[in-house]
């Protein structure tokens, strides 16, 4: 992708700042995990949120402000959009998988990305998994890493021997792909219904071969796009056919993604 030279040279430094921002919120997040006093609220869309989501996002925003990216806005799941039509914006999901978080399930994490707004393409991305102490990160042209060690997606190319994480059958039906789900379930070696950024991280390191998900927010997928593609994978993302301003995606092994897309009719 075409990135201005001045910005390209700054990507390694900006990624370091994004990593610090994501990791810096971990103490706040973990202080509420499995806490008997955890306060759980409902948002207008009925999804759950906690005070730790909001405070973690405040901390991440303050840390990213130190990066001083000219003309970059910021958008977070909990504190809203302050991008004001900027060409670039930081995207934040302080606790991706808040439902898991509130249930005491450790498969949640923090997402930070720098996004090209017009192209809908991430320039750098971070997935931090606080319970596991793992940080997955990448910038365009720099490779993908977990805690400093290079990672690669799976080399699997055959659906019949692949482990695939998918949205529910209901989500496929809503997207008009009910028959595609049946073809997939009758062909794939193993289907898993995991979700959120833990699954994305496991796909980036090759433990899961591919993922199909629907109706994601931009902050749910931007970091993953960069990490998966820099890990040698492929990420197909399209505008959702059922939910305005959201996205559907297939990503993982570069040799498997196109086959999956054809099989399910993506």
Image: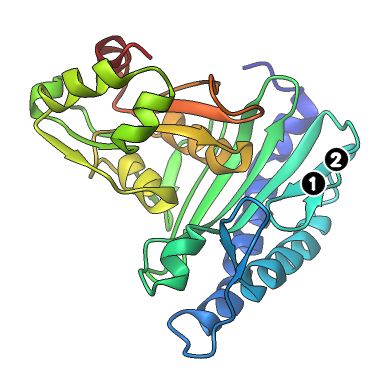
Q: Position of residue 185 (x, y in %)?
A: 15, 27
The residue that disc 1 covers is 74
On screen, residue 89 versus residue 25, left or right, reads right
Q: Position of residue 255 (x, y in %)?
A: 26, 17
- Kindly indicate the quadrant of the structure image that contains residue 184: top left
Q: Nearer the viewer, residue 17 or 172?
A: 172
User: Quick check: can you spot residue 188?
Assistant: yes
On screen, residue 126 versus residue 64, left or right, reads left
Q: Nearer the viewer, residue 56 or 37?
A: 37
| Count of marks overlaid on the render | 2
- Residue at the spot 68% in from the left edge and 52% down from the top edge: 77
User: Quick check: can you spot residue 233?
Assistant: no
Would you place residue 52 above or below residue 177 in this image?
below
Q: Position of residue 220 (x, y in %)?
A: 55, 43
Q: Quadrant of the N terminus?
A: top right
Quick one: SS at disc 2? Answer: loop
Q: Position of residue 11 (x, y in %)?
A: 67, 39
């Amino acid at each position: 992708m075409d990135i201005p030279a001045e910005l390209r040279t700054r990507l390694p430094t900006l990624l370091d700042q994004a990593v610090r921002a994501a990791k810096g919120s971990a103490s706040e997040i973990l202080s509420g995990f499995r806490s008997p006093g955890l306060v759980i609220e409902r948002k207008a869309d009925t999804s759950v949120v906690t005070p730790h989501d909001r405070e973690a996002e405040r901390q991440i925003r303050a840390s990213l402000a130190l990066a001083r990216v000219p003309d970059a806005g910021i958008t977070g799941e909990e504190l809203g959009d302050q991008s004001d039509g900027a060409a670039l914006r930081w995207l934040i999901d302080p606790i991706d998988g808040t439902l898991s978080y509130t249930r005491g399930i450790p498969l949640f994490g923090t997402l930070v990305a720098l996004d090209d707004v017009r192209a809908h393409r991430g320039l750098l991305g971070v997935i931090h998994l606080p319970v596991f102490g793992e940080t997955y990160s990448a910038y365009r042209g720099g490779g993908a890493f977990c805690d400093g060690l290079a990672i690669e997606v799976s080399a699997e190319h055959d659906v019949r021997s692949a482990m695939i994480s998918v949205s529910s059958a209901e989500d496929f039906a809503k997207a008009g792909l009910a028959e595609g789900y049946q073809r997939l379930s009758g062909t794939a070696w193993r289907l898993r219904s995991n979700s959120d950024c833990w699954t994305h991280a496991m796909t980036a390191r090759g433990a899961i071969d591919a993922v199909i998900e629907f109706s994601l927010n931009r902050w749910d997928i931007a970091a993953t796009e960069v990490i998966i593609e820099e890990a040698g994978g492929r990420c197909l993302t399209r505008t959702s056919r059922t939910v305005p301003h959201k996205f559907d995606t297939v990503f993982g092994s570069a040799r498997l993604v196109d086959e999956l897309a054809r099989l399910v009719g993506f």
